Amino acid sequence: MVQTLERLAKPATASHPVAKAVPPYSWSKALEAEMAPLYARVQHVVTPMEWPHYAPLIKSINELKQQRNAVILAHNYMTPEIFHCVADFRGDSLQLAKEAARVDAKIIVQAGVHFMAETSKLLSPDKTVLIPDMRAGCSLASSITPEDVRMLREAYPGVPIVTYVNTSAAVKAECDITCTSSNAVKVVESLGAPRVLCIPDQYLAKWVQSQTKVEVITWKGACEVHERFTGEELQTMREAEPGLKIIAHPECPPDVIAAADFTGSTSGMIQWVKDKRPPKVMLVTECSMASNVAIEVPDVEFIRPCNLCPHMKRISLENIYDSLVNLRHEVTVDPDVAQRARRAVERMVNLTN
C-alpha cells in the first residue's frame, strides 16, 4: 500500500515583464513561398490566419540558432509551431535530459519549464542554458522543498529516495536518484530495497506501486493538469465516441488509470498511437501533445480533452526569439547543489542508457 505525506504547495514567483525583441522579417509572398514546406507540416493544426504571424518568427529563430550555435530542446507539451518548426530535439523529460548531456551546441534554449532547464544545466554545466520565461514553473516542483526531503530522511532512515525529475535541483540534491514517468518502475526496482520513497507525485507513485512488489511511500504532490481528469469523464467520452481508445499518463488519478486502455509516459503514449493506429484515440494529458502527434499520424482521429498546462504555455515563439537575441533568461545552479543533484540525475541516465 502506498503511504502518502503532504505539505501545502508554495506559489511560484513571477518575474517583471520586459520589452521583447522584434524579428527582422515580416510577412510577404516571398516569405510565404520560402516557409511553405514548414507550413505543410503543421497546416492541420495551425490555421492560415496564424501562420503569417508565426512564419517571420520561425525564420528569425532558425537563423539566429545558427549564428548563436544554439539548440532548442522542446518538450512534448509545446505548441506545434514550436515543437515542429523550431525545435532541434523533441521528447519527454528523459529524452531531453539525455540530449542535454550530449549536445555540442554552446547554448541550450529550454522550451519547457524551469526544472527541465535546471536539469539541462546539471548535465551540461559548461553550456549556457536559457529559459524564455522564468515564470514557467511546475505544480509538482512547487509541492516539495529540500527541507521536506531532509525531514523524510529522518522519518524513514535507510529508505532510499527516488525523486521525479519534476522537482528543483535543490530537491534532487537531497535524493538518491531521479526518475521520469517512463522509467520510474525500473528505477525503483534497481535500488534493491524493500521500501522506497517515491516523491513528490502521489499518483505516479500509486501507479508505480501497482507495477511492483516494492513498498512505495510518497508525498502528496500532484500535476495540476493531470489531476483534473476523472474516470467518470472518461466513461462519458467512451459512451459518446464508440470505439474510442483511451491512453493515460501515470500522473493521472487511479480512477483515470483504471478507465484507460493503456498507461504510459508521454513518449510511451506517442509510441502506442504510432504502433496501434486506432481509428479514434483520446490522450489523457496536456492538450498540445495531441496536436503534435496528430501531425505524425494523420490517419488517426484525436478526441481532445483540453487541460492546458499554464506553465508550459508561457513559452512562445516570441519569447524564444527574445531569449536568443538577448541571451535571457540564464539558468544557473549553485555549484554544491549542482554536484549533488547531478549525481542523482546521472544515476538515472546511466541506468536507462
Image (cartoon, rainbow, N blue to C red):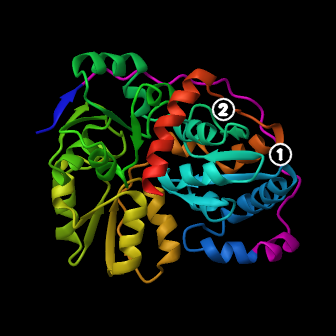
29 inside magenta stretch: yes
- Residue 70 vs residue 26: left or right? left
Task: Give the residue type at disc 2.
Answer: Val
Q: What's the magenta bit mostly, secondary-structure-wise?
A: loop
The answer to whether one can see residue 155 in this image is yes
Q: Secondary structure at mark 2?
A: loop
The answer to whether one can see residue 310 in this image is no
Taking the spot 69% from the left edge, 60% from the top edge, the residue there is 86
C-alpha distance separating marks 1 and 2: 23 Å
Query: Can you identify the residue that label 1 sits on?
Result: 22
Q: Secondary structure at mark 1?
A: loop
Quadrant of the image containing the N terminus = top left
On the image, the x and y values in percent for residue 222 come to: 31, 37
Q: Given the current orientation, which residue lies at the most extreme front position?
A: 192
Work out whether residue 109 or residue 18 is closer to the camera in this orientation and state it.
109
Q: Quadrant of residue 28?
A: bottom right
Work out whether residue 15 or residue 151 is closer to the camera in this orientation and state it.
151
On the image, the x and y values in percent for residue 104 come to: 74, 53
Query: Can you identify the residue that label 2 sits on?
Result: 331
- Residue 171 vs residue 116: left or right? left
Taking the spot 58% from the left edge, 24% from the top edge, the residue there is 14
Query: Which residues fall within the magenta stretch?
Result: 6-35
